[in-house]
Structure formats: C-alpha cells, structure tokens
Amino acid sequence: MSARNNSPSSRHTYLVCYDISNDRRLRKVFKICKDHGTHLQFSVFECDLNPRELVQLQRTLKEVIKHDEDQVLFVSLGPSEGRGDRVISALGLPYSRFDAPCYVV
Amino acid sequence: MNASYYRTARALHQHPAALWDLEYLYEPLPIPEDHPELDLFGFQRASHPHNAPTAVLSTREPHLTKSAANDSLPARQLNEYIYCPRLFYYEHVEGIFLDNADTERGSAIHQKIDRGRGALPKAQNPDAAPNPTPSADNTPTPPESAAPPETETIHSRSAMMSSERLGVVAKMDLIEVQMALIPQSTHNWQPQSTANLTKKTTKKALPNTDQPDLFAAPPTDSTSPDITDTAVPQPQLLHVKLHQHKVQQVTPVDYKVGSPRIGPEANELWDADKMQLGLQILVLRDNGYHCNEGVIYYRATKQRVKLQMTPEVETWIIQNIAEARRTAASPTMPPPLINSPKCVRCSLAPVCLPDETRLLATNARLPENPPSPTRIPLPPRRLIAARDDERALYLNTQGCRVGIKSERLTIKDGDTTLDEIRLSDVTHVSLFGNIQLTTQAIQELCEQEIPIAYFSMGGWFYGLKNVHTRIRQFAIASNPVQCLALARKIVQAKIRNHRTMLMRLHIDPPSTAIRGMKEIAGRVPDARGLDELLGMEGAAAALYFQNLSGMIKIGQNDPDDDIPGLDISTALQKKLRTEKETFTFDFNQRRRRPPTDPVNALLSLAYSLLAKDCTIASLAVGFDPYIGFYHQPRHGRPALALDLMEEFRPLIAESAVLTAINNRMITPGHFVRAGDAVNLTPIGRKAFFQAYEQRMNTLITHPIFDYKVSYRRVLELQARLLARWLTGEIPDYIPMVTR
Ligand code: SF4
C-alpha cells in the first residue's frame, strides 16, 4: 500500500534499554526512542518494530551514540501480535498496553 | 547524500546470519596507510575549495524522464532489470519505490560510502596502443624502461561517470587505482595519448603535453572536449601530491549486502551484480581508464568476487541494455517471475502480487477451468503481511488541534495534550467535524504517504502514481460495454454475499428471500444495461433489508442470557430497559437521508467508513477514485470507490453493525435524536469506530488465494486485481465472494 506498510513480516516487540554517559547524547537517544516506542521506565522503551523499522532505529541510534562509551541493548520479545500471554508483567505500578484496533481521539 | 538514490526495491540474496548484524555498516573502507597525505578521501578534501563544485562529482541521481528511451540509464537500474524486468518497470517507469529491511541496510552501506567525494585521478593512457575495442587481453603494460615502475594503490570513493556509447551512467562505490611511478625518462609518452583514445570517450582530455605533473591542476576547460551528457559532471584532476605517479589501472569495487552465488568451482557473481559491475568496467574504459576486472565485496560472507571483462560479457551487457530500453518504452509491464525465490526478498511483492497475478492470468482457479492434471498451479505464497501493523486514527473530539512534534502527532484541546501518536503507527487519518490539522502536520503526513480523509468536507490528500493504470481506467470507464461487464460482476457478488449473510446469521433463515436472491443473482449476467442492473440490485436489496432485523439478536431471548455468569449485570439491564424506551434496534427499512432509527444511523456511518477505506485502497493502487464503472461520475462522489465497495458492504459494513449491536458494543444510549434524524453520540461513534476497525482487522482465508489476510488487505488486493484487469494482465475481475 503506502511505502510504509509493505513489510511481509509483521512487527516484533523489542525492549530497548540504554546506558548513555553524556547528557546531550542521552537526550538525543531518548528522543529517538520516543519516536519509535513507548517509554516504560527511566531508560527502557518498548518498541514494536518490523525488520525495516528495526534497521532504521539502529541506524539512527548509531549516528548518535559514542561507540566506546555508550550502550544500547535490544531485547527481542517475539511477535507483537498473537502471543498468548503478555511477556511483560509488572509489580507495583501497573504496566498496561494499548490494544484497541484503532486510535480514536 | 541522496538517500533515495539507493532506495532499490530489492537487496539480493541477503545472508540470514547478517540480518541483525549492523556492525558492517560502519566498517571503514581501507585507507592507504603508506600515503596518509593522499587527499583522496571525503572530508579532508573539502578543505580544497577550489575543487568545488565541479571537482566533486555529484552523488545525486541524475534526473530521469522515462518517456525518452534514449535517456541515460543508471547502472543500478540495469542491475534491477537483470534481477527482474518487472521490478525495473515498476521502479523506473511507474516510479514506485518501497523500502524493506534489505534495502534499508543497503542504503545504510551506501550512505557510509557516499561520504567520499567521487573524484578520480585523471585517466591517461601511457602506453600508446589505441584501445578502440577493449578486450580482456589488452592488459596495460607499462612501456619498457630501465626499471619497472613502482606501483601504488590509492582509492577513490563514490565516483559517477557516464558512457555515451552505452547510454549509461554508473556510480561506483569504490575505485582502486593503481598508480605507477613515472620514470623521468618517459615523460615524453604523454603527447600521443590523446589521439589514441577511443572516439566515444568524452571525459579524458589530457592536459597540455608539457605538464609533467599529472595531478597538479585541473585541465583547462578550453582543452576539454564538449561534454554532451550534461547530467554528469566530469571527473577532474585531484589535488594529489604524488607528482611522479600516473594511473596505471583501475578496478571498481562494489559493495553488496548479501552473499555471493555458490558456483560449481568457486563463488560467483549473481547475474544482476555482473551487469552492474560489468557496466562500471565498461564505463571506466570508455572514460579512458585501463580496466579489465572489477570486484564485488559481499558483506554477508566478507568475500571478494572478481569479474573479468571478456568480449562475451560485454556482448551480454549490451544486449541487455537494449532489452531494458525496449521494456521501458513499452506500455505493458513485463509479467511477474514464476514462483521465484527473488520475490520473497522483493520489497515490491505486495504491489506486484506475482503469484496471484500468475494464478489469475491462467484462470486456473476459476470453476469454469478446473486445474488440468498436468499443470496443477502452485498455491500463491503470501508475500504480504496478513494485516497491517499500523492502525487508523480517528479524530473525533470537536475543536481539537493536531500538530507534529518530531515523529509524533500531538493532539491538543486548548493547552492540554489529549494524546501523542507516532506516525509510524498510523495507516491513515480520518477527521470528523471541527478539527484542525496544522500545515506542518499535513506536510509530514503527505510526506510519509499517510492519507487524510476529511469526512465533513469530503476532501482528500494523497499522491497519485501509476499513470498506465489511470489511462486504462479512463478508457474503460468511457466504454459502456466494459462498464456493464464489470458492473454485472460487482452486483452479482454483492447479492451473493448478502444471501450468504442471511443464511449464516439470520435467526430463522427466510427461505423465500434466499431463493429469490439466488434467482436474481442468476439473472444478473443477462442484464442488458445499467438501468436493468440497477433494478435487479434494488429488488435483491429489498429482499435483504426486509430480513435484516432477523440478524439483530438483542432483546430477543438470547440463550447466552440464560447461562449463569454470562448475565449482564442487573444495573446494566435496568439501564438498558430505561433507554429502550427511547431507542430500539428495530429495523424495517433502509432510510438514508436522514437515518431515522439507530440501525440506519449505524449503517450510514459504516458505509461512509467503508467508502473511505475503498477510496484509500483505490488511491494506493493509483486509480482516480472519482471515475467509476457502475457508479457514474457525479460531483464529489468517489464513484470508483463505491464500485469497489459493493461486494464488501455485507462483509464489512453490515457485519460490523450487526456485531456492534449483538455484542452490545453499541447500546441505545449511544444515540441522540435531532428532528427526524437519529445520530450517534460522540461516545457512540467512538465505540463504533472500534467495532468497525475490529472487523477490518479480522483475518479471513482468502477464497481464491487460500491464505489468511485481514479484510483491509483483501480490500487492497481487490483494488489491485481490478487494476490488473484494466491493464489486461488478468482476463477477468474476480469479485470477493465468501465461501
Ligand atoms: S515480486 Fe517478483 S516478479 Fe514482482 S517485481 Fe519483485 S521480483 Fe519481480
């Protein structure tokens, strides 16, 4: 259809965690992750990405981080849809995921 | 750096092991260690402003107009032609590019490489032998001298050159340049060399003979022959401090994401790569360089594979250039590949639908042509995602304002932010009523090809491509015979789907109506005109809507209500009872303007949502949604979308309405009356959007292709099949009829 939704394989969920040693870069990394996923915790994002979007995110992050000081981890949690159980559960404050079939504002 | 240059729609033979490994994107290219002072690499040379702009070769793709077959073809396009002629046609004639992970990775590599500035030491032909027909055995032998010249290898990145003889522009990732030390005694080779160059070469004017320093200064323009191919800047001399070296031989090196083909004896180049690299060699030769072989570096296996230029390879290349030109000039698209593994990697597969097109082109699955035992067609592979990752965005809060912040849409009511939604999560945006989109938001949405539908105004924002599809659309829309043929199919499919609905969902399927509808559907192919067809459609619709209320199973004794634990709470029951006094889901008759009861209000909303989705689907395929075949053009009516919609009315719209009512997603409390008209409240509308989108996202087994896809995908598939029928690729449009 459009240039965007043509990936034959659907999205996977990734937990993206980072450790950035410099404030300026940290802000940039935060902003990039915010454009790709949901902010879960201090430096943890949950991102649903198809293979193309993953490459794109990694590319963008690579441009920003300093390779000998910072680290970004990608933890794959499998396909975003059709997983029986949630792979993330929470203690304390609730973790809730928005699962409606569309956005209505 | 022009990223779109490398938005090729395929990346060959990607090695799966390399899929998640991105390190290679940043692996630096080799730098000649012994000569760090060589100023041949990107950023450093920017400090030589006198080189700019002509000395820096453009890394932009020359603008190409496809109409003229004699335009220069980029080597990359010819690579694609060898990979798949249809892909070449889609990208370079129809202008459709799509990215997938492979192409994204490829463009990352090239982005890295493109930081080079594309300059190459000037070509010289020190040995006086003329070289009009380059061949493999014409190796550059330095002329005899007392001591063999020392050689030195330097690199040039991202150079672009053209050959008029071939009509090709080639961009080279990397060129290894072998420099030979010029023995002082042989300075007198130079003067002759100009005359010995091939006629066709355009960019090899040698500077004045008494200029011993070959790299000291760019040639003066007056001595250069006219550059006829204006799209390509000429290579210029570099500022190189090696005064005593000359170019002896050059080797283009191209970077590929994937792995080489495993040949019987050694690793081999893929044909498409052979084409591209071969062209680079020929283009370099035509520019006066000695070049006999090229190298492809396959990133996945970290292997270099060589190509030796031979007369056979050259003939093969020239033949294919001619064929590619013929293809580009033709109005018909080449057929898809047959069951090829290339399609799995091809990012255009969802547009191209290779297996589906093949299947329907042979009509193998039609009941009239049962598959012959000799050629049982393979079931199509599902090369499209079963459903969209993205979701529709409905803007329904009156007075809200939508802006953009980074890659997110921000929806604000006054100063409070209602929501932030990432653009990458949105398929399209629908606006109901008084909602403002900022210009920046509109621009960004258009840029990302996200359609915007203004429901209150009936407006659209979207770009159109696929010229050929539209030319056929207009031609057939003005041909009454073909319009009628298509209209019959559409109407028949709709009646059949209506009938199936009644049989499946009616509490007590009405046999008379079902028989009546079957009888009408049987007569549809004999309709002699659109008027007669309209009459048949009306008669069948009447039978259907007379019985629609039998599919609403609320208020009647729902067996679920008797199961303990499944009871709806007494509070809700009480609420329902009080509300029922105002509204009920009784339905007698379809009333459109205005809807006078809740079911009609829901149906009206559902149909307009479906019309929106059909419009989006037809726009995505490249149709003009306002020119239809069955529905005749009328101002502001998306006639084509309405044609496409007929068979889906029962399957999507009415089904969503029934589900919403029967599952109590919509209750009588969700309606308001204004005069005669009954409308949904904003909350009711919101609930219905969810019900509708849920239906759109439902996976079904496609009746013809036998794989699972969502209704939204089916809609898009139908639009593409309609386009295939228009361009004659498949003999018949096959409407969607549920089994
Ligand atoms: S899907 Fe297959 S046939 Fe279609 S363009 Fe791609 S490679 Fe060619």
Image: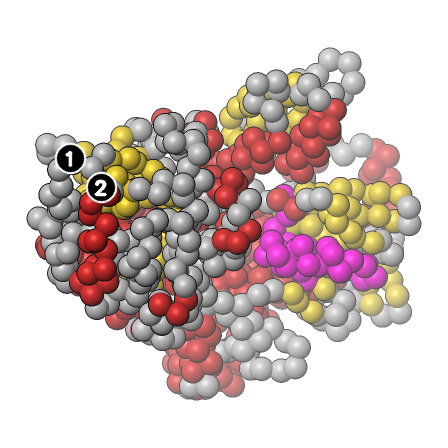
Identify the image's colour scheme: rainbow, by chain, secondary structure or one colour.
secondary structure
State the image coordinates of residue A102 (x, y, percent, origin top left).
Answer: 67, 45
Residue stretch rendered in magenta on the structure: B425-453
Give how far across and how far down residue B137 sits, in percent.
8, 48
Question: Residue placed at 41% from the left, 63% from the top?
Answer: B220
> Considering the numbered disc 2 on the image, is that residue within a helix, a strand or a loop?
loop
Q: SS at mark 1?
A: loop
Q: Is residue B388 left or right of residue B353?
A: right
> Mark 2 touching mark 1, by CB under 8 A?
yes
Residue B184, compared with residue B732, is above or below; it is: above
Which residue bears the numbered disc 1? B147
In the image, what residue occupies the spot 10% across and 34% down?
A: B264
Q: What residue type is labelled 2?
A: Pro
- Sequence-earlier tag: 2 or 1: 1
Q: Is residue B166 magenta?
A: no
Q: Quadrant of residue B71?
A: bottom left
Read off the residue under disc 2: B183
Figure label count: 2
Relative to B274, say whether B616 is above or below. below
Which labelled disc corresponds to residue B77?
Answer: none
* Residue found farthest to the right: B414
Q: Quadrant of residue B17?
A: top left
Within the magenta stretch, is there residue B432? yes
Q: Which chain carries label 1?
A: B
